Amino acid sequence: MRRLNGVLIGAVFGMVFVAVNANAPLPPVAGTILRALATLGLAAVIVMWFVAMRRTRGGTDTGGDPRPGMFNRKYVVIVALEAIALFGGIQVLRLLGWPSQAGVAWTALIVGVHFVALWPVWRAVSILIPGIGLTVLGLAGLVMVWTQAVTWVPFVSGVLSGLVLLAGSLFYAWRQLRALTAR
């Protein structure tokens, strides 16, 4: 169940990434469609989370999760470093005069690196694969801020990162729910 809680958190952030960044240069209709799809993806994860909670009698069953201490000291250190890198890095980018779109790319990069850093702690592919995706999309956006494609950084590093989070969340929520029903 703890793993499914993390998937739910990932889906929420994925939807936020899409909702905040699905703007121009995308046509307004495309932005609306992407926001609607992201909302549906989040709703599906929420439904699967509630079904899993019900099947495990309020989430007391770990669903075979052998890591009862997922949110241990290593986790706290990684999240603290993420917060410092995220907010400090955005301020440094501003001071250096980077385009405002760099903040979206930086956010995707730091969230991706945070997921990759958590993989040795949790040993869950469900966090490693999206982490690699967000890291790559964040790096791509940081490169793009210095090109003619700067206006597309929110799409590449924001919308696509959100879709990676949502797709991963949907896949792993479905997989976890199927494992619960197979017992």
Image (cartoon, rainbow, N blue to C red):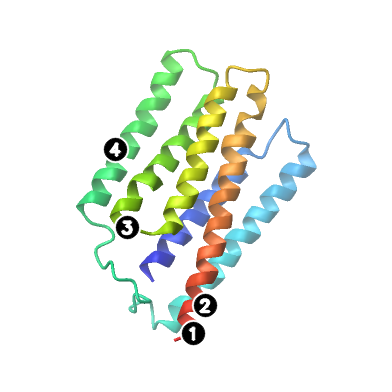
> The residue tagged with tag 4: helix, strand or loop?
helix
Residue at the outermost left position: 73
Q: Residue at x 45, y 18 (%)?
A: 94
Label 1 secondary element: loop
Location of mark 3 (residue) = 122
The amino acid type, in three-letter code, at marker 1 is Ala
Residue 61: which numbered mark, if any?
none
The residue labelled by disc 4 is: 81
Q: Are marks 2 and 4 in contact (CB under 8 Å)?
A: no
Whole-angstrom CA distance, mark 1 to mark 4, is 38 Å
At label 3, the amino acid type is Trp
Observer able to see residue 51: no
Pointer 2 or 4: first along the chain: 4
Q: CA distance from mark 2 to mark 3?
A: 21 Å
Badge 1 density bin: few <14, some 14–19, many ≥20, Cα 10 Å: few
Q: Disc number at residue 182?
A: 1
How far apart marks 3 and 4 lie (CA) works out to 17 Å
Q: Going 56% across and 26% down the picture, which residue do you hit?
A: 101
Q: Earlier in the sequence, mark 1 or mark 4?
A: 4
Q: How far is the residue under mark 2 from the one under mark 1?
A: 6 Å
Q: CA distance from mark 3 to mark 1?
A: 23 Å
Amino acid identity at mark 4 = Leu
State which quarter of the image contains the C terminus. bottom left
Q: Position of residue 31 (x, y in %)?
A: 72, 42
